[in-house]
Amino acid sequence: MKSAHYSTFAFLFAILFSFSWETSAQSPEKFLHCLSLRSNDSSSISKVIYSQNNYSYSSILESSIQNLRFSTIDIPKPLVIVTPLHASHIQATIQCSKELGLQIRSRSGGHDFEGLSYVSEVPFVLIDLVNLRSIDVNVENGVAWVEAGATIGELYFRIAEKSRTLAFPAGICHTVGVGGHFSGGGYGGLFRKYGLAADNIIDAQLIDANGRILDRQSMGEDLFWAIRGGGGGSYGIVLAWKLKLVPVPATVTVFSITKTLEQNATELIHRWQYVAHKLPDDIFLIVTITRVNSGQEGKDTIQAAFTALFLGGVDNLISLMEIRFPELGVVKQDCIEMSWIQSLLYLDQFPIERPEILLDRTAVNKTLFKVKSDYVKEPIPKIVFEGMWQKFYEEEGKYGIIFLIPYGGRMDEIPETETPFPHRAGNMYKIIYYVGRAQEENLEFQKYINWIRRIYRHMTPYVSKSPREAYANYRDLDIGVNNKGNTSYAQASTWGFKYFKNNFNKLVHVKTLVDPQNFFRHEQSIPPLSSW
């Protein structure tokens, strides 16, 4: 999910910062020389590698940094950036990184919430997949191949170019890269109807730690299972995904209705808990909670926006809401009929007349932000929400947002072991806690992080337990991290079971088989049992 609070930025990196990492074995020159020897296309290597003294280094590095918490001068920078034009450049980068003792970070859209796709505390090389973004849509067979550097917006646009009645069930923020999004599961407005993005992937191409290019058949079903929801950066680098497209009606309907506390927002949110996950799978009804000006001088209030996507016409939607959620008071004038592709723009808060904006990788404004997540299995008492409102009235709460995402539908039908993503039946809804600020001079963002942690603690008794579950794509290092080098199963378990429940054990087993030396690793990567 994306927030309108993401705001634009511009900044200049101190390009000399990471030179303290360089040794005789770890220099850009050594790396470039190694790549030229290892690549099958050595003539093009100079066009895809950028060291810190290269004029384009900073602009390429910052182009896909979506969280400005990781754009400051003290954040470690890659020794070099590689922007591969084809698979051989990635294979050579893996081989040279091994030889020179460097880690690899791979970036698709740059939306990792803790920056793990482009930041490391140890010397590293960044593989930016921005040049690998081709999309091939086959309407007749209802499938598409998409390279990992493409964004979901580019994918949606290419599907809509060829069909008004085909879609793919992935996220809403169109600048998110498919490489990381699909690796962690990926959900959006269609997931109650068709499940996650990962549930609709039918093949993939992956480069493993040995530099081999594998497809579903050659990698085997266990590894194919692990890369569809087990999180990015653990098993290799995905080159491309093969997707099963899904049918949608030519006309869908949307609405967004706002209610403040003075308009019974608390009661409606409390009632929503009993309704949203039991609605037919054709409707996706989310709640967005913010602090707004009440219209009375010097006084703020809490506002809840109830936003829906319905796979059908307005008359059927009104009939459904009158029966299932009459308290919300939806009327025909609140609703807009449109195509599926237009509904994505509507949910992403862009003009629906401009589908080409889905091709703009820079259209979403950027902020410093922190996100946490929870899963809810029983209705939360109204008094708990009222306690939350008090935290929104704190200074930092002005910049906070809470999203309530309903489950049910198809998500109740898919077994939690089908993919590594385990949050299926038994979940009423997911909570997303967000706080973000535009980049400002001398901004002390830590106090905003502390604020979101206080809300998270406030909710502890009312959300999932043993483990307190979290969504892997909403990366949160607060819940646990690996050691900087190799890490133990016990250490990784502190966060692993929260993201994956018992699927974590199978993920560790697969990792042990395919990458026993733990070459692909980061602060929350799956460890092999051999790593300790």
Image (cartoon, rainbow, N blue to C red):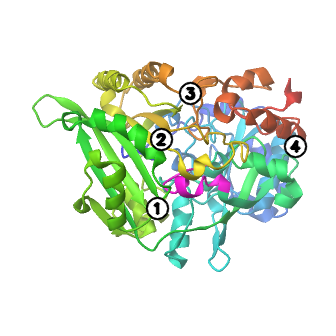
| Residue furthest front as drawn | 323
- Determine which residue is flagged by label 1: 360
Q: Residue at x 51, y 69 (%)?
A: 248
CA gap between label 2 and label 4 equals 39 Å
**Residue at x 33% of width, y 27% of height:** 397
Under mark 2, the amino acid is Leu
First reached walking from the N terminus: tag 2 or tag 4: 2
Residue 454 location (% of width, % of height): 43, 19
* 234 displayed left or right of 455: right
Judge whether residue 46 can be spotted in this image: yes
Which numbered mark, 1 or 4, is in the foreground of this view? 4
The crowding category of the residue bearing disc 2, from other C-alpha atoms within 10 Å (few below 14, some 14 to 19, many at least 20), is few
Residue 59 visible in the displayed image: no
Helix, strand or loop at label 3? It is loop
Name the residue tied to disc 3: 464
Nearer the camera: disc 4 or disc 3: 3
30 relative position to 218: left or right: left
